Image (cartoon, rainbow, N blue to C red):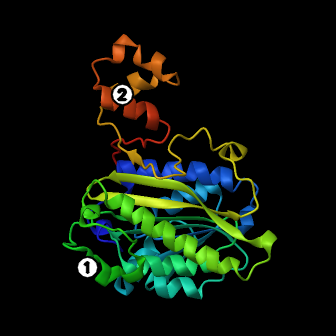
Amino acid sequence: MSASGNSINYDLRTAKSVERRMISSVVKELFSKVNHNKRRYIGMGSTYFTDFKLFHKELHIKNMISIEIEQRLQKRVEFNKPFSCINVEIGKSTDVLPQLNWNKNVDLIWMDYDEKLNYDYFTDIEIIFTNMAKGGVYLMTCNKQLHRYQTVADFEEEFGGLVPLGTHVTDFNGENDFKLIRKMLLNKINEVVQSRNYSLEENEQLIFRQLFYFTYRDGAPMISYGGYLDLKNNAFNLKDYTLDRFDFISTEEIRYVISPPVITNREINLLNSCLPNSEKKYNSFGKIQFIPESDRESFRKLYKFLPTYMDVMY
């Protein structure tokens, strides 16, 4: 279980909840022609299995694998499994992933590490992109902080050849760390895919298409990065998958910052009554002007993905 799983209820992390629903909305379109029996989810459910619950219900995935590194938590994790279709695999992801059967499935893989950037994450990329079938979706999440590195030499000592040429110590600060991490992840993914293509016929060759590039914080500052493994010869267009309606999709270097509004339930009801509408029309309503502009705008962008919280007596 990750460190945050011991201290924060995954169900109550607002930005994380928004992220899950965004991912689910995109994968629903990408998997629209994938038989339900061929879909598989590989993730890290901890004891909450929040993403597993959502993806099982929304994406109809019945083959699910949760990787749990801590042997001592096996009984607790097994007890908290919400569905019988979840198989818990105990061990490090670098040990578990090579043991999986990769031949029959179209995978949604979310390596939600939660900790700071680690060399093993790139080993996982090597395993996943060497084996994942076309049409699969990959994401990773980690704490984006790199300020513990005082020099580029310190960083190179841990990450070696993964460090891009031209890396500067200023890339470790909070305004640049996510850019460096994205570059390292994308370089590694492309390297593995290109190596794999050498053994494939031209019409079978693959390409990675970036779709997700989020930063957010529910405490620690996080980055999530990922995309879609497609056939190289496919003319991929967001509109063809009805993904052009999602303004949070990022195919380039610009990240999407998930910053949920801090507003009351009564304010939520008021703002809901003004949506859906164009940005101009929405902001013209006088009755909502007392709510801070940043919160109003955040709500307009995220309202379809925000969770609903309530007190329940039981």
Q: Residue at x 43, y 41 (%)?
A: 306
Q: Nearer the viewer, residue 76 or 176?
A: 176
Mark 2 lies on residue: 296
Mark 1 lies on residue: 153
Residue 61 x %, y %: 64, 63
Q: Residue at x 36, y 74 (%)?
A: 1
Q: Callout 1: helix, strand or loop?
A: helix
Q: Callout 2: helix, strand or loop?
A: helix
Instruction: Kindly identify which numbered label has been placed on residue 129.
Output: none
Q: Residue furthest top?
A: 286
Q: Residues within 10 Å of mark 2 (few under 14, many from 20)?
A: many
Residue 295 x %, y %: 32, 31
Q: Nearer the viewer, residue 13 or 176?
A: 176
Tell us which disc is closer to us: 1 or 2: 1
Which comes sooner in the sequence, label 1 or label 2?
Answer: 1
Left or right: 17 in relation to 56: left
